[in-house]
Image (cartoon, helix red, strand yellow):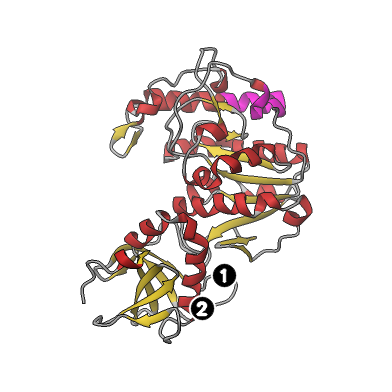
């Protein structure tokens, strides 16, 4: 089925490090973003893709986690097909089928189908491809948004030109920016986008930053945004909150939300926890931080994500007044627990920094195991 969105709304988000293998040799150029761009702009995009393809395949100093990108498993069959400005035969899957990262896992199979069939537009920012449509055929690849890649995409504002042309061609009135990671968000000149008279709401998650926020964004798209009409999305105000996702007219990570690069030292408990201050439009009395263990336990129980986020807001408003869900743990010097049905949130107070530290989340029978006094 051809991709034919018709509304004035555009969702913009990231690609995915995790990808599905396989596919077919069929390449439908009509599904590619180049099919809706002027020839000159489409040619610029393909030439830039070809340059990054050469970087991925042959640059010995382009590494990812200590390994040359050219040697990564996903790049072994990557070739110069028509998607990358070449003529070789390659193996393709539609973008929505190829990507399997946090955003796409949260969407689920039904959400992916709804996104492809939605009246609203969607574009993905990719290290190798630049901008992609949901049904665009792409190869299996690994191309992290490292500085040399980002520099090529920022050169001569190519991605901004492609985005602005898309905005004008389809009459986009509002963009919901779900990019999450600054390395992607900064590829776009948002002032130039603003000059098109298109309104933008940038999304931030009250529970997580960077790549981890993509789970909340995917869930928000699947459960909230895809159910709204064009008018409903265009009428959303700045500072509006959908679940844990806050929509702001400011693109920077502002005070009150976790920074992608922020790290907080919380004694020996959370060497890499991230602060959340003044969640949402209303200030909270306590700041919030969470340990890496708490974070991993939450993402292992995504079915409880909405209830967890609501509970953490309640804790931050008043973490020390005993009431039905909250009590101090017996035999513990500083720990408290929040009861959430069969689950428990364990937290403690860093009174010097006036901050609640979320330590563990799990079923009642498991969450207390191994706690020291």
Q: Nearer the viewer, residue 127 or 326?
A: 326
Name the residue tied to disc 2: 284
Is residue 218 toward the left or the right of residue 308 in the image? right
Residue located farthest toward the top when viewing the structure as drawn: 88
- Where residue 126 appears, as percent x and y from the top left, is 52, 36
Q: Is residue 360 left or right of residue 198?
A: left
Q: Which residues are magenta?
A: 30-46
Q: Which residue is painted at 74% across and 42% down in the image?
A: 119
Residue drawn where x is 50% and y is 51% of the image: 215
Is 29 above or below relative to 278? above
Q: Residues within 10 Å of mark 2 (few under 14, many from 20)?
A: some
Quadrant location of the C terminus in the rendered image: bottom left
Reply above or below: 36 against 263: above
Query: Picture coordinates of residue 22 (x, y %)?
Result: 46, 23
Residue 35 highlighted magenta (yes or no): yes
Query: Could you say where residue 97 lies in the image, as x and y percent from the top left?
Result: 54, 32
Name the one closer to the observer, 186 or 103.
103
Q: CA distance from mark 1 to mark 2?
A: 9 Å
Quick check: is 2 in the magenta stretch?
no
Q: What quarter of the picture does the N terminus occupy?
A: top right
Question: Which structural element holds mark 2?
Answer: loop
Determine the secondary structure under disc 1. Answer: loop
Residue beneath disc 1: 280
Q: Which of 9/305 is in front?
A: 305
Q: Is residue 37 visible?
A: no
Specify few, some or many for label 1: CA neighbours under 10 Å numbering under 14, 14-19, or 20 or more.
many
């Amino acid at each position: 089925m051809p991709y034919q969105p018709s509304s004035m709304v555009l969702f913009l988000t990231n690609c995915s490090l995790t990808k599905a293998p396989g596919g077919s040799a069929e390449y439908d150029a009509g599904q590619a973003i180049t099919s809706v761009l002027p020839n000159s702009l489409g040619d610029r995009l393909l030439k830039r893709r070809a340059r990054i393809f050469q970087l991925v395949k042959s640059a010995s100093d382009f590494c990812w986690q200590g390994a040359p990108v050219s040697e990564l498993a996903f790049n072994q069959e990557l070739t110069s097909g028509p998607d990358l400005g070449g003529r070789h035969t390659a193996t393709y899957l539609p973008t929505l089928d190829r990507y399997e990262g946090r955003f796409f896992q949260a969407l689920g199979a039904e959400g992916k189908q709804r996104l492809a069939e939605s009246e609203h537009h969607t574009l993905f920012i990719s290290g190798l491809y630049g901008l992609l449509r949901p049904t665009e055929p792409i190869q299996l690849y690994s191309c992290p948004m490292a500085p040399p890649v980002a520099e090529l995409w920022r050169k001569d504002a190519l991605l901004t030109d492609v985005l602005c042309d898309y905005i004008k061609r389809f009459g986009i009135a509002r963009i919901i920016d779900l990019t999450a990671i600054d390395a992607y968000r900064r590829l776009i000149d948002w002032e130039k986008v603003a000059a098109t008279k298109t309104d933008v709401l940038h999304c931030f998650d009250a529970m997580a930053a960077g790549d981890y926020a993509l789970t909340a964004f995917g869930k928000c798209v699947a459960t909230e945004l895809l159910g709204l009409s064009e008018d409903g999305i265009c009428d959303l105000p700045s500072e509006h909150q959908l679940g844990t996702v806050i929509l702001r007219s400011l693109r920077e990570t502002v005070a009150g939300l976790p920074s992608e690069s922020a790290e907080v030292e919380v004694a020996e408990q959370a060497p890499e926890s991230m602060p959340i201050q003044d969640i949402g439009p209303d200030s909270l009395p306590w700041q919030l931080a969470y340990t890496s263990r708490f974070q991993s336990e939450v993402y292992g129980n995504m079915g409880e994500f909405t209830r967890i986020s609501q509970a953490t807001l309640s804790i931050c408003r008043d973490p020390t007044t005993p009431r039905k869900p909250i009590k101090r743990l017996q035999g513990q010097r500083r720990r408290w627990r929040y009861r959430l049905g069969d689950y428990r949130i364990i937290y403690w107070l860093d009174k010097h920094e006036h901050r609640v530290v979320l330590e563990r989340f799990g079923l009642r029978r498991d969450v207390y195991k191994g706690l020291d006094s």
